[in-house]
Amino acid sequence: MQHAELAALLVAAGNAEREALLQENSALANVQLAQTLKDICLEGWSSNPAQALRAAAVLQLLSQLNPDPEIAALCAWSAGLEALIHGQMEHALVRLEDAHARFVTLDQPHTAAATQVSKLISLAILGRYDEAIECGLSAREVFLAYSDVLAAGKIEHNIGNLYFRRDHYHEAERFQSAARERFSALNDQKQLATINNCLANTHALLHKFKSAEQLLEEAVQQAEASNLTVTQAEIEGNIGTFALLQGRYDRALDYLERSRRRYALLGMSHQSATAEQEIADAYLEVNLAFEAAAIYERVIPKFSELGMRAEQARALAHHGRAALLLGRTEEAHSSLVEARNLYAAEGNEVGRAMVALTQAQLDYHQGNYAAAAATALHAEAPLAISGSWRRLLLARWLRGEAERAQGHTADARSILEQTLLEANPRQVDGLRA
């Protein structure tokens, strides 16, 4: 029997059978088997989480039967991936750091750096962005020294996603595009499916709608061909978000619900909560504020429990908008203050600007037109840096409306005409306070 065959049997077996299989094949219960199991876990965590979890469980058993230090390091790595699947980011970080330290002790710098690809995901979700970038760039240097183009691309992909989480879309595009070039050179269809999906999302928010649509079409074909279940759920979510930006609300809700169901079946609670939040965002866009608020109130505690600070901040900010539409002004104000504090803790100036924009809307609806104009103006600079023209133009339009409400007709006309001039070529419509 070969290591790959034994690994497959172990992953498919039940708990009682696994120990017997390892005892019967003790000559194969070594580092090579552990490496094969780690590969199954690493390959499956984003495409077949159930299989990845079974591989991690086998590795844990193998490490108990064989105390080899390299097996222990590989076991720590797989435990980190297991925690990622369950959305336990703090625990994932502890296990991945342990794996990294063990591989450094074993004088395996390249393998040690490989654990950092997964670590970057944990750091990003926990909001430790500067640390994540430093970690990623350091690992990339190791990969390039070893001519590991695939791993270098994965790191660039993760760094790009990290910038996306901070709403720095131009920086996200730069790193994601670099990763895409590496994956294209390798003709790696699985990696291309994931990067095309992420880059499409970035292009959509930069209002590069044509290229976003092309990238999503490529991602769908690649994910289906490679049977990437998790990536398919991510793509469905992004198709829904893209449809929302285009004002195609039925399509948006359809795809967002597909994504939510797929995540729920996969048992990925953190992703399922994110998909629910995106459904709430769609409800909010069509003024179903009561339905949206109910979802935000359900997912905000989940994000808090999972340590997903960026998602919690966004949900609170949007809950503030929903409460505003429902006339619950005190509740809106409370949500916005909490969201602003979380974004401040993240060092996310763009996020704070988006909260300020909602605060300006609240001021406007309460008749505080001078405050609305000043707050909207304050939000414009960070929104311009992010590259999100829709939000920037909304801020400018709101400022123009606030000036008009104060009787500043000339200033209002100038602002609104300039906003309309910039909105037309970018296909930005549906602006409203």
Image (cartoon, rainbow, N blue to C red):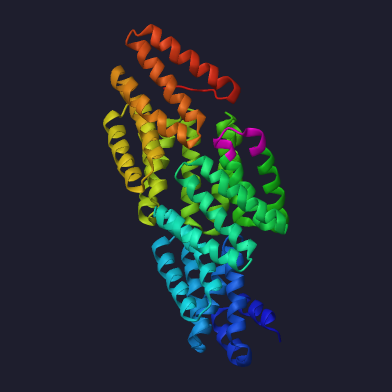
Q: Quick check: can you spot residue 255?
A: no
Residue at figure coordinates x 68%, y 47% from the top left: 220
User: Where in the figure is residue 19, as x and y percent of width and height?
Assistant: 55, 86
**Viewer-nearest residue: 164 or 309:** 164
Residue at figure coordinates x 66%, y 43% from the top left: 216
Q: Quick check: can you spot residue 432?
A: yes
**Viewer-nearest residue: 73 or 363:** 73
User: Where in the figure is residue 90, as x and y percent of width and height?
Assistant: 39, 63
**Viewer-nearest residue: 377 or 233:** 377
Residue at figure coordinates x 41%, y 53% from the top left: 130
Q: Is residue 38 above or below residue 391?
A: below
User: Where in the figure is residue 365, as x and y percent of width and height?
Assistant: 33, 20
Residue 408 in magenta stretch: no
**Viewer-nearest residue: 369 or 392:** 392
User: Where in the figure is residue 172, as x and y percent of width and height?
Assistant: 53, 45
Q: Image quarter for residue 397?
A: top left
User: Horizontal placement of 301 versus 53: left or right?
Assistant: left
Q: Is residue 29 above or below residue 397?
A: below
The segment highlighted magenta reads: 203-212
Q: Is residue 205 above or below residue 163?
A: above
Total marks placed: 0
